[in-house]
Image: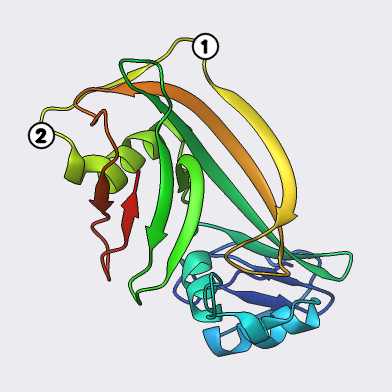
């Protein structure tokens, strides 16, 4: 019988393979035990990922990756002996009154490092969260500091589109990532018409320029 990892730990190891997630079955194993965060770096390196550059330049740290997994923002698996990160992403195209799409220009991390982004508003979806719930959370968490309290979100008809792509992650170099994009277009009342900055209400207070 397959064993389940404890949700408080968020990572499991099987005899024939590894599967990191929260409360998920460890695929392909008859016995499993739960990992702690300190073992994730070794798991990544065994899966072909060089973690030496993690935490430098634009790369995030191994601990940040573990936090991402325990928050159910991603799943890590072995595929063909290589580490694979799987992320569901809401890609929100917010249009202003002139039909222009809002782009995030730069992200400033809590430790002061900055990353060029040049992408529409994006949010990693959590666990079994629907794209609609993720949309409202993205606006609330990433843009509310620049919006009036009575802002409204209006979805554009037939704008939802689903696509999947594989690419190397800028946040975690060398870790192949499967991105499942849920793209949708919307209008948000009160959105500034000129460039602006926001502060995301989380630990450390990440800021972004749009």
Residue lying at the far right in this picture: please name it.
Answer: 80
Residue 2 in percent (x, y) is at: 72, 67
Contact flag, marks 1 and 2 (Cβ < 8 Å)? no
Graded by Cα atoms within 10 Å as few (under 14), some (14 to 19) or many (20 or more), the crowding at tag 1 reads: few
Q: Residue 58: tell me if it is visible.
A: yes
Residue at left offset 46%, top offset 51%: 126
Residue at left offset 35%, top offset 15%: 98
Q: Residue 34: tell me if it is visible.
A: no
Q: Nearer the viewer, residue 204 or 210?
A: 210
In the rendered image, the vertical position of residue 102 relative to residue 171, given as above or below? above
Which residue position holds label 2? 149
In the drawing, does residue 73 fall left or right of residue 15? left
Residue lying at the far left in this picture: please name it.
Answer: 149
Residue at left offset 52%, top offset 74%: 66
Dot 1: element: loop
Which residue position holds label 1? 158
Residue 10 in percent (x, y) is at: 53, 72
Residue at left offset 49%, top offset 56%: 116
Q: How is the image coloured?
A: rainbow
Name the image quarter holding the N terminus.
Answer: bottom right
Q: In terms of sequence position, does the residue under pointer 1 or pointer 2 come before the other?
A: 2
In the drawing, does residue 152 fall left or right of residue 148? right
Residue lying at the far top in this picture: please name it.
Answer: 157
In the drawing, does residue 145 fall left or right of residue 130? left
The dot on residue 40 is none
Dot 2: element: loop
């Amino acid at each position: 019988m397959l064993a389940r990892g404890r949700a408080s730990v968020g990572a499991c190891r099987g005899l024939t393979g590894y599967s990191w997630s929260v409360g998920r079955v460890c695929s392909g194993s008859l016995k499993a035990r739960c990992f702690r965060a300190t073992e994730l770096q070794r798991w990544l390196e065994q899966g072909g990922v060089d973690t030496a550059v993690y935490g430098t330049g634009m790369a995030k740290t191994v601990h940040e990756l573990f936090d991402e997994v325990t928050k159910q923002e991603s799943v890590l698996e072995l595929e063909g002996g290589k580490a694979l990160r799987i992320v569901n992403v809401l890609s929100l195209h917010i249009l202003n009154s002139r039909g222009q799409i809002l782009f995030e220009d730069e992200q400033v991390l809590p430790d002061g490092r900055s990353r060029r982004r040049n992408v529409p508003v994006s949010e990693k979806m959590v666990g079994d969260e629907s794209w609609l719930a993720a949309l409202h959370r993205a606006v609330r968490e990433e843009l509310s500091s620049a919006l009036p309290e009575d802002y409204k979100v209006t979805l554009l008809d037939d704008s939802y589109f689903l696509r999947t792509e594989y690419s190397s992650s800028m946040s975690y170099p060398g870790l192949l990532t499967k991105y499942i994009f849920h793209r949708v277009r919307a209008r948000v009342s009160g959105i500034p018409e000129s460039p602006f900055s926001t502060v995301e209400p989380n630990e450390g207070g990440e800021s972004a320029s749009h």
